[in-house]
Image (cartoon, rainbow, N blue to C red):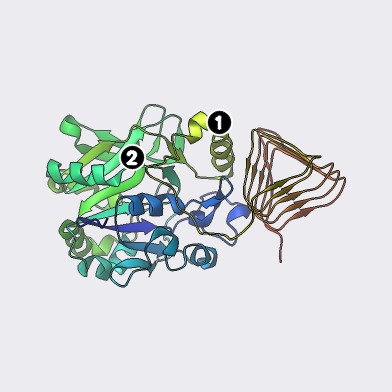
Amino acid sequence: MINRKAIGYITANYTCREQSVLLEDRPFASLPFIGRYRLIDFPLSNMMNAGIKTVGVVMPGNYRSLIDHIGSGKDWMLDRKKGGLFLVPGNPYGTSRRGMRFLLRDIISNKVLFQRSDKPYVVMCGSNVVFNIDLNQIIDAHASSGAGITMVYCKAERAHEDVTSLVIGEAGRVQSVKSGCQFGDNKFLDCFIIDRQLLLEIIDQYASADYMDFFEAIAGDFARVDVCSYEFKGMAVGIFDETSFYKRSMELLNPDVADKLFMPDRPIMTKAHDVPPAKYAATCHACNSLISSGCNINGTVRNSILSRGVIVENGASVTNSIIMQDCVIKSGARVENAIVDKNNVVPANTELRGTPEAILVLPKAPL
């Protein structure tokens, strides 16, 4: 299936507003998530499932791990002779304001991506709000509404200052946007549909405001542009810092929650790794955990998420923790309430322990 109506644009050129060792040499979009995925997998898969075959990904300065993960787009069927995946340049951010995901400067820099398309619409997405959505329904709703822009939102389940919220008036028209949200607000999911010709007009009209976020720049023109809204009633997981990354990941250990994100008819695709299934020794004890392929479990794993290639030796224990790729938990070691980045070796008979309120974060080990 090829979507004849839209092309895709995913912005990965932003980072956490708080310092994090998890993001020292990787962008937010390539942050590992629930074992085998990266955050960028979700917008890419949403577009693949909607048949969108031309997708531009705005690259950050520290793009190495992102390129290593998505490559030519083969795993999302975007390695094509016509259309396909385009890794397009991003620009340094000139502001530290929260909630900025669609820097107008990036959109202007990649004007040619929109000029060369013959599709009437552009689907724009960020990478750090994770959800599984039928984009075709939103494209059809946008086309029938007659609006120039359709912004996707859901009801906020918690307060967060790094989220954009929508003020919605009659007939679902968006009157304004504001930084931050409270419980029950209309939380913007960093996903919207825009008429391609309107986007090209905005690029020309707002060139002098290129340092601003897209919606910040056009704030005075919402009525003229006709900005509509679309309520998403599924589950949306926002990842904005270390705390939300840990909490939202651990919530997905509940199968009832995970089933709202992973659906057989709309699969989430990721980079293929040719590794064997996880191996569970007779001495192991594993419960309520997500354990990826290539792991070797000899010790105890409880309420935890293990990425590919993790080794938990006999007598070691991992509890309430996230262990990333190729880590080794040596015999007798204990890891609790922690995030351990890739390639770390936790020495034998040592203890890494955080608290539920203050998670211990161990940075990536040098190779």
Q: How far apart are marks 2 and 1 (CA)?
A: 32 Å
Instruction: State the quadrant of the N terminus.
Output: bottom left
Badge count: 2
Residue that mark 2 sits on: 178
Q: What element carries label 2?
A: strand
Task: Report the side of 50 relative to 348 (left or right).
Answer: left
Q: Is residue 119 above or below residue 182?
A: below
The disc at residue 254 is 1
Q: Along the polypeptide, which appears first: circle 2 or circle 1?
A: 2
**Disc 1 secondary structure class:** loop
Where is residue 6 shown, x and y percent of the image?
Answer: 23, 56
- Find the residue positioned furthest to the bottom: 81
Q: Is residue 289 left or right of residue 5?
A: right
Above or below for 288 versus 164:
above
The three-letter code of the residue at mark 1 reads Asn
Horizontal relation, residue 121 to residue 278: left or right: left
Q: Where is residue 115 in the image (x, y as percent from the top left)?
A: 21, 68
* Lateral position of residue 334 relative to residue 230, left or right: right
